Each structure stands twice: as structure tokens, then as C-alpha cells.
Image (spheres, coloured by chain):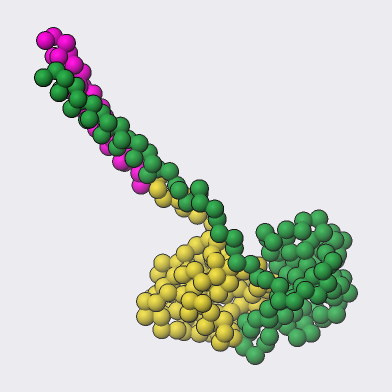
Chain colours: A yellow, B green
Amino acid sequence: MPDIRLASATKMRQTPLLIRVLIGIGCLLPFGCTSPPKGDPPLSIKLYQTWQLQPGDTIGDRSVVGGLGDISVALDGHNVYAPFDGRTQLDKRRCLFFSSPDVPAYLFRLCGLSDPRLGSVSQGDAIGSGQLLQFAALRKQPNGTWAIVEPAKSILERTLKKP
Amino acid sequence: MHHRKSRTTNVKYMLAGGSVVAALGLLADPSGLLPAPPPAKAVCQEVVQPRAVLSRDQLSKLLTIPERAAKTQVRQVVKEPYCQLSDVELRSNVSSRREAYPLEFDPQTWLVVMYEGDEYAGYSFSFRH
């Protein structure tokens, strides 16, 4: 009889401990399951063209969504896709830059995406979506600047349609 | 009575222990255990010179050539490529030609050189070949 009381008393003390341990583990789960955030500093690209306004600038208290050299595409919430294997980075204006070792000397700038995917991407991966995409192709110049050039239709097609 | 009590206690401990193990399992990232799919790399369309590699000397000479230089100037340094990748159109009405050279001192890494017509457009390093 006394040992039963002892056992139940021990059980009384142990059960809340177990629950506390479980709650503790439960609280840690969100941290364990998410990969650490990417700490890339914003990309700094110097354009060859010295135009005053770029997407992301503010003029007359309004924000500029597209500039000279951008192709505006009505995405209507659809995805855009990585045209090659490569990498995506944001600049300080929150535009997404896509670069690929398979395509030297070129960068593609995508402004207006709401949930861009950052880091290493494979060809055909969704890299973001939005309502209005501003797409620009940039070509490397000998002095290290990047010139906005007219993108080929095929590269836009690769970006807008999943291969 | 005593027997039944210890049995329910056992069940409770098993459930609690199982929950702890299951919770710990959730902490593990199983994606790391799965083999990573090989990246779909730019593939050779046509092998030009199967023995072609790029030496350190050639590489450092190539890096001194500015973009927009003549293709012949680049070819004088790097010679014939290992292979040619598929042509791509990035700028409207301009076809970009890509040629690949494995590095002599790091064959898993390729140098990709791009030309637009007779003009050198630029280079990049492509890893894990």
C-alpha cells in the first residue's frame, strides 16, 4: 500500500515534467524545420546607362515600377521561372537579378515580384510571381558596368513558361 | 489492481517516449539524407577538341582581354575549345555562341567563353562537370 502511494506520487511529479519537455520541443520545432535565412548582402550593379529613374525609385511621392529598357509583362499572379541553372539575388531596390554560369556576360533583372526565391536555382524552378513584371536584360561592358539591352523573345519565353 | 496500474503507466510512458522520439524526428532534416539530383548542366552539343584544356598561363592571359574584343584575339590565347554548347539567343537578333574549356589544374571546372558574332562577350566558370 505505501509503495503504491509512492509510485503514484512519483508519477504525479513526472507527468508534468514530460509534458513540459514535449512543450519545450514543440516550441523548438519552428526553428529546427526552417533553413537558416540567406544573409546575402544586396547586390550592387552599376548600369552603363546613366538614366535618372530606375524601378524602385520614388518620384513625386510615387514609386517608379518600370524604367527605360524594361519590358512590362502582365503576370496576373503567375510564376516566373529560372531560364537556366543559376542564382538569384536582390538589389537594394528589391529587384531580383538572375545570373548563370551557363550564360556568361549577361544578367537578367526582374522587378515587381512579390515573393522572390533567392539563392541557387535550377532551370525551370519558379523564382517568383506577381501582377506586373518589369524585365530587363543586362550585358557586361569592358569597364565593368552593365548595359541594358533589348532581350530576345526566346529568353522571355523561357522565363515566363515552365520548360 | 497493482498490475493494471503499472500497465497503464507503461502505456503512458511508451506514448510519452514515442512522442519525444517523433518530435525529435521532426527536428531532423531528411532532405539532407536524400541524394541531391545532379544539376542539369549546360551540355556539349559537339566535341571540338577532346584533349583541350586550359592552363593557368592561358587563363591569366584570357583575363587581360576586355569584353567586346575580337574573337580571334581570344582564340589566339585559348586555342580550340573542348566543346561547343548550344547556341542561345539572349539579345534580340543576336545569336550567342558558347565554348567550353576544362581547366588543366581543376578538370571539374569549366571555363565557358561566349562570343556574339566575331565579338568576345565574356566568360564564366561552370563548376561540377
Residue shown at 39% from the left, 77% from the top: A78
A110 and A62: which is toward the camera:
A110
Residue A105 location (% of width, % of height): 68, 73
Report the quarter where the N terminus of chain A lies: top left
Query: From where the camera sits, is residue A50 visible?
Result: no
Figure check: B54 above or below B28 = below
Question: Where does the magenta region start and end?
Answer: A1-30
Asked whether residue A42 is drawn in magenta, I would say: no
Residue B75 in the figure: left or right of residue A8: right
A143 and B27: which is toward the camera:
B27
Residue shown at 43% from the left, 43% from the top: B28
Residue A34 location (% of width, % of height): 41, 50
Residue shown at 40% from the left, 48% from the top: A33
Residue shown at 46% from the left, 75% from the top: A80
Residue B45 location (% of width, % of height): 71, 76
Figure check: A41 above or below B11 = below
Residue A17 in the figure: left or right of residue B106: left
